[in-house]
Amino acid sequence: MILERFYDHKLAQASWLVGCAATGEALVVDPHRDVAVYVGAAERQGLRITHVTETHIHADFVSGARELARATGARLYLSAEGGPDWSYAYADEDGAVLLRDGDLVQVGNVRVEAMHTPGHTPEHLSFIVTDTAGADRPMGVFTGDFVFVGDVGRPDLLEKAAKVTGTMEAGARTLFRSLQRFKARVPDFVQIWPGHGAGSACGKALGAVPQSTLGYERLFNWGLAAEDEEEFVRAVLAGQPEPPRYFAEMKRINRDGPRVLGGFPRPRQLPEAQLSALMDSGALVVDTRSAADYAVEHVPGTINIPLNRSFNTWAGWLLPYDRDVYLIVDEHAGSAVDEAVRDLAMIGLDRVAGYFTGRAVQAWKDEGRPLAAVRQITSAELARRVAAGEVNVIDVRGAAEWEAGHLPDVPNIPVGYLAERLDEVPADRPLVVQCQGGARSAIAASVLQARGIPDVLNLTGGYQEWVREGRPVEQGADGTAAA
């Protein structure tokens, strides 16, 4: 048996290839949209991809299962356990084999058994793998978003992201029962091969270790250790991070059928002089340069989403799916435009209509148009100006972070909700935006400036620096606004 893990750090997402060396067949589990990585890996291993599947209808990235099956001629295997609301609309069109609990798929000498493990989602399957060439008991389980290293899948996404009301508690109870059945069904020596790692919003305490065993997780994974259902329900629903806005769009795309791309085409580079016309027309322009460069000078009306490890997340929070997007990329960053286009496509943002290099910023200036900047403020200066009543402050971290500790009397509006909650943003004085370390607040400053609030300052070092200098904080709700 051949096993290979693929990990996308920006999505914090793992996919897997399992193959049979004897027959050359291979199965890919939970592929993302960049399917060339799987095709290349299979070729290097002397395998051909004959089977493609996924554990569930994903919420955090566009599935590549359909794309990979089309590219390789592989058979597609999809869950039939979701009921009418969570069935794959494209299954018949693509000739997919529908799997139910207990169904077997043979990949050469590798036997894969589908186990229905609902709770995170109604249709969720885990796949129990046995290498029958040398064993009669399973080696591992592809657990998708059911069991992670150190955590279990969150059951609240259908309600919070897909807006299916009244499903959180029911999902939590279903998840508890799935975990109890899983522990009774699977031996402790079996390896756990999860679909996500640390940084994913599909849980609240995911570990960075790529795999584990059921026996280890029984001891140290709070979700698997829980034996009381009521206690489990309270714990699994508490403190979950806000699901990014794009999760609802991912659910719809992956259920109805992702568009087959056939690769990531590079958009055309636009002449620098065209930027002014686009901005005058109200076009959506995203400056992907670093927060530091953007803070020094940028084209007014653009928003800053730096092309770093968090690019996918904030693009999904802030960019609409029904508009063209134009990019400004750092001309010194090599293939920055290709990276940005791939990252956006991974979450279904396929409408990149063109791009500029950073030289367009200078061209804007050369036309005699004013550039904007984001002023920085230290915690010492902020403390002085707050005491003097000279500034307002908002905390743009997540609600759970704010509850754990925040600056006195500072309200919470997470950066992803700023555009829809502008009426809550105080505008009678200069506004300081603050997050944990200064990165999210830099994005928030650009959003606020683009929405017509020009006098915005960013707290350098954020809440961390404020605490490090021994300044006062508050904990828990105190009547200020929280998302």
Image: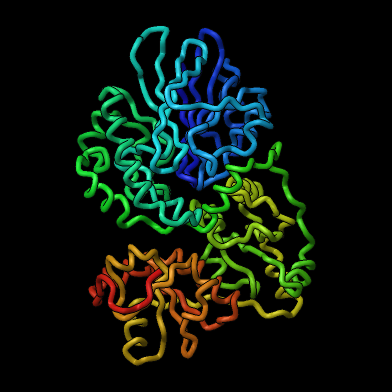
Question: Seen in the image, is 226 located left or right of residue 143?
Answer: left
Could you tell me if residue 334 is visible in this image? no
Residue at x 30% of width, y 36% of height: 179
Q: Image check: 139 left or right of 69? A: left
The foreground one among 26 and 163 is 163
Could you say which quadrant of the image residue 477 lies in? bottom left
Is 379 displayed left or right of 274 in the figure?
Answer: left
Q: Who is closer to the viewer here, 76 or 60?
A: 76
At 46% from the left edge and 51% from the top edge, which residue is drawn? 158
Q: Residue at x 59, y 21 (%)?
A: 49
Question: Could you tell me if residue 371 is visible in this image?
Answer: yes
Image position of 351 with respect to 123: above or below: below
Q: How is the image coloured?
A: rainbow
Q: Quadrant of the N terminus?
A: top left
Give the position of the C terminus as an image quadrant: bottom left
Residue 351, image quadrant = bottom right
* Between 421 and 159, the one nearer to me in the picture: 159
Give x and y (percent) for residue 110.
46, 14
The image shows residue 109, relative to residue 463, as above or below, that is above
Is 253 located above or below residue 285 in the figure? above
Q: Residue at x 36, y 48 (%)?
A: 170
